[in-house]
Amino acid sequence: MIRIPSGKVLAVRDCGSIWQLFYELDGNGLGVVNFDHRPFAHFYEGVTGRDFFRDYAFGAGRDYVSQQLKDLRIVVEGEPFSQTVKLEED
């Protein structure tokens, strides 16, 4: 049986041209997913139900965005640069 990486979101970092989402692997270690801006905004809006542009531009910026995702449990499928990230189902 292949184990799909999953874990708790620790932080999100705005790196200019990409966003990085760091998560704690259930087994052991740290995972990272790199997003382009549009896919990250789409992911953010889908899992939080919030408006990314408002939260980033009119909220407290990148720290506020990171806090909205912190502690959510995610599942990551696929190879780097073509990964699918979704919330873990109960």
Image: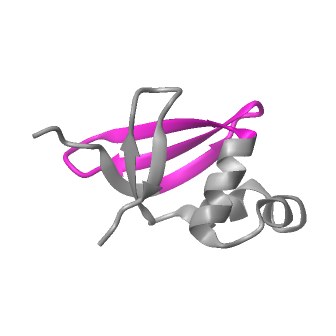
Q: Which x, y percent locates residue 32?
A: 46, 38
Report whether 77 appears left or right of 19.
left
Q: Is residue 20 left or right of residue 17?
A: left
Left or right: residue 84 compared with residue 52: left
**Residue 67 visible in rendering:** no
- Please give the name of the residue rendered at 56% of the width and 63% of the height, measured from the top-left corner: 69
Q: Is residue 35 visible?
A: yes
Q: Compare residues 75 and 72 and report the one nearer the observer.
A: 75
Q: Quadrant of the C terminus?
A: bottom left
The quadrant of the rendering that contains the N terminus is top left
The span picked out in magenta is: 10-37
Q: Nearer the viewer, residue 59 or 46?
A: 46
Q: Quadrant of residue 63?
A: bottom right
Please tell me which residue is depicted at 76% across the width and 61% down the height of the picture: 52
Q: Residue reaching furthest right?
A: 58
Q: Position of residue 29 (x, y in %)?
A: 28, 40
- Look at the image and name its color scheme: one colour
The residue sitting at 30% across, 44% down in the picture is 5
